[in-house]
Amino acid sequence: MQSRAEPVRARERAQVADAAGDARRAAPGPYRAPWWLPGGNAQTIWAALFTPDAPTAVRRERWETPDGDAVVVDRVDGPARAPLLALFHGLEGGSASHYARALLAHAHARGWRAALPHFRGCGGEPNRLPRAYHSGDTAEIDWMLRRLAGEAGAPVYAAGVSLGGNALLKWLGERGPDAAGVVRAAAAVSAPVDLTAAGEALGRGFNLLYTRNFLATMKRKAAAKLGRFPGIFDGPRVARSRTLREFDDLVTAPLHGFRDVADYWLRASAKPWLLQVRVPTLVINARNDPFLPAAHLPRPDEVSGHVTLEFPDTGGHVGFVHGRFPGRHDWLPGRIAAFFDESTR
């Protein structure tokens, strides 16, 4: 006798297949910025502040970490057997970030499920422990992905943006062939794979505008943390910090076991690990990204044969706006989805 659940599962599988087929037919070509949006800074800022998007409803969960802390995870539900997209956000980002809204909406439109685990202290909720998160936090990536893979009952695909992209790439390199048992394919967008070069770039000229934006929330969180854990760092010096180099030297490095900022930026960078990646992985960085000068992007001989490098001339930092004014966010999700489809056929 056929159970009532079997027709439901069949319909779910058909819905997922139809959505994936539609996405393959709509796979975008190479990225080119629209004529009305010139320059890496304009592309970065416009995408973050002015381009409309289609919000997707999320369901929030709280996870206990292995060391007694807690994080919040925003989920997009879908058919039980649908693939799952795990998305890792950038510095001080989260599910409200423009790229996250676009990627979560695209996953939902494909009939996929999605999960965005917020790093510690992000998502609008402080974490319990003195530590927070950092660009090379692969232990955090590991337990998050393994938990999602254990629950999914279907293939898991991972994407990381900016800081989250660097951490994801480093995890892929460190785990090598073992990562294939957790994720089917991966993508990193605007990842600062050379943190020293990125940190220096963000410490001068117009880029100090981005740094001030990051530090506004980072300093608030640091002050709150100092109130709960007196003496863990020098509060007045943190309050006076003007660059990520200064903040990371005072806060990020010592809280996470690094000797100083130079040690942190060196050891947390993903670039040296790209030769060890054994999972199909797409790396998208614009050559005019103000956060990472093009000279420091990885060369083909610095990555494994499993890594696809895609470096369009334009796009800024996660600023891949597409189409007529005021632009859309559909190119990036479409390109990542097409790569996932192509790499797993």
Image (spheres, rainbow, N blue to C red):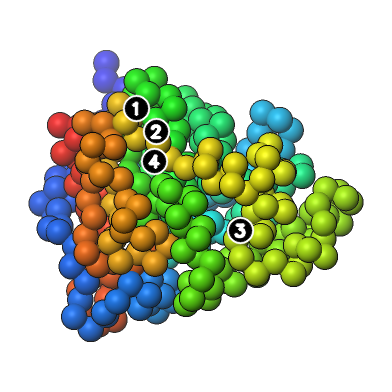
Q: Residue visible at 59% across and 43% down?
A: 264
Marks 2 and 1 close (CB-CB < 8 Å) = yes
Q: Is residue 209 above or below residue 15?
A: below
Q: Which residue is mark 2?
A: 273
Q: Which residue is mark 4?
A: 271
Secondary-structure class at tag 4:
helix
Residue 64 x/y as whole percent:
67, 35
Marks 3 and 4 close (CB-CB < 8 Å) = no
For this rendering, which residue is in front, 129 or 123?
A: 129
Secondary-structure class at tag 2:
helix
Instruction: Tally the numbered discs.
Output: 4
Marks 4 and 2 close (CB-CB < 8 Å) = yes
User: Which label sits on residue 81?
Assistant: none
Residue type marked 4: Lys
- C-alpha distance separating marks 4 and 1: 10 Å
Q: Which residue is mark 1?
A: 276
User: Can you tell which of label 1 and label 3 is closer to the viewer?
Assistant: 3
Q: Which residue is mark 3?
A: 245
